[in-house]
Amino acid sequence: MDIFLSVDVWIALLTLVFLEIILGIDNIIFISIASSKLPPQEQKKATNIGLVLAMVMRILLLFGISWLISMKEPWFQVDLSFMHAAFSGQSIILILGGLFLLYKSTSEIRDKVEGDGHHDLDSRSNKGLTSAIVQITLINIVFSFDSILTAVGMTNGMEGALILMIIAVILSVLIMLLFANPVGKFVQEHPTIQMLGLSFLILIGFMLIAEGMHLAHAQVFGQEVGVVPKGYLYFAITFSLLVEFLNMKTRKKRV
């Protein structure tokens, strides 16, 4: 393992771990939302299974890098008067994942706004662990896909890139396993944070759709669809959370 004698390799590894954790935040939010209607004794189990599935999928996708790269080739084209696009496998996965996130988040927001406590209790008792894991698995495919494409771009041409990415994925998931359940519990105990989390998922859903359309080189009304920089998105999420924490502190002082 001569590659680990290089300082640049260690810097790249730390950067990858940090990147995987940052990109895994939206995954943790979705997992906590998907498991929130399970009985309390099953929520931790669903969260742990979800994160382990994310790790397995990312490692499998890493071994299929050549397959991922080949999915850049267009599968079919759309030529309409207002839109032109060439959809590849990568773009389709991201667009479908974004649509699923939009559907899931808006459905949860509607239930929380229009539903009452009895409705939530019934949903919690009727929702099975299998259903939650299926939802988590579906969205893990999208998040893992997006995460691996970013990691491959960062390590392109680097010696031992595959080993570095696998180690980064394992380390990041282990770190997330330590914090996922406390974060999920905190989100579930604070309705405003939960609503904020659902709003974040809507933003991430739109971002995935925009990214998928960008990969398809889509032009809508003569304008090419651009990609939303992830830095802007995570800055907005961080800023919103800081404002909400200040609101929570203010509410506590009033009480």
Image (spheres, rainbow, N blue to C red):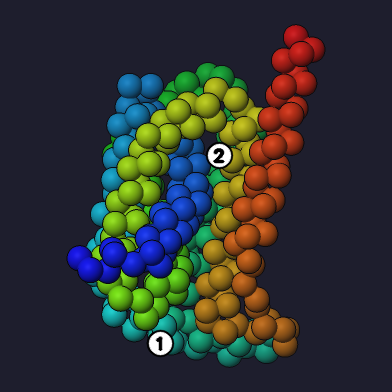
* Image coords of residue 63 (percent x, y): 24, 69
Q: Which mark is residue 167?
A: none
* Image coords of residue 164 (percent x, y): 31, 64
Q: Quadrant of the N terminus?
A: bottom left
Mark 2: amino acid:
Glu
Q: Residues within 10 Å of mark 1 (few under 14, many from 20)?
A: few
Q: Is residue 120 left or right of residue 174?
A: right
Identified at 58% across, 77% down, the residue is: 214
Q: Which residue is mark 2?
A: 108
Identified at 43% across, 87% down, the residue is: 74
| Spatial separation of the CA atoms under disc 2 and disc 1 | 36 Å
* Image coords of residue 167 (percent x, y): 29, 57
Q: Residues within 10 Å of mark 2 (few under 14, many from 20)?
A: some
Q: Give residue 175's quadrant in the image.
A: top left
Identified at 37% across, 23% down, the residue is: 39
- What secondary structure is marked by label 1? loop
- Residue 146 visible in image: yes
Q: Is residue 103 left or right of residue 130?
A: right
Q: Are marks 2 and 1 in contact (CB under 8 Å)?
A: no
Q: Which numbered disc, 2 or 1, marks the residue closer to the eye?
A: 1
* Image coords of residue 137 (percent x, y): 34, 51
- What secondary structure is marked by label 2? helix
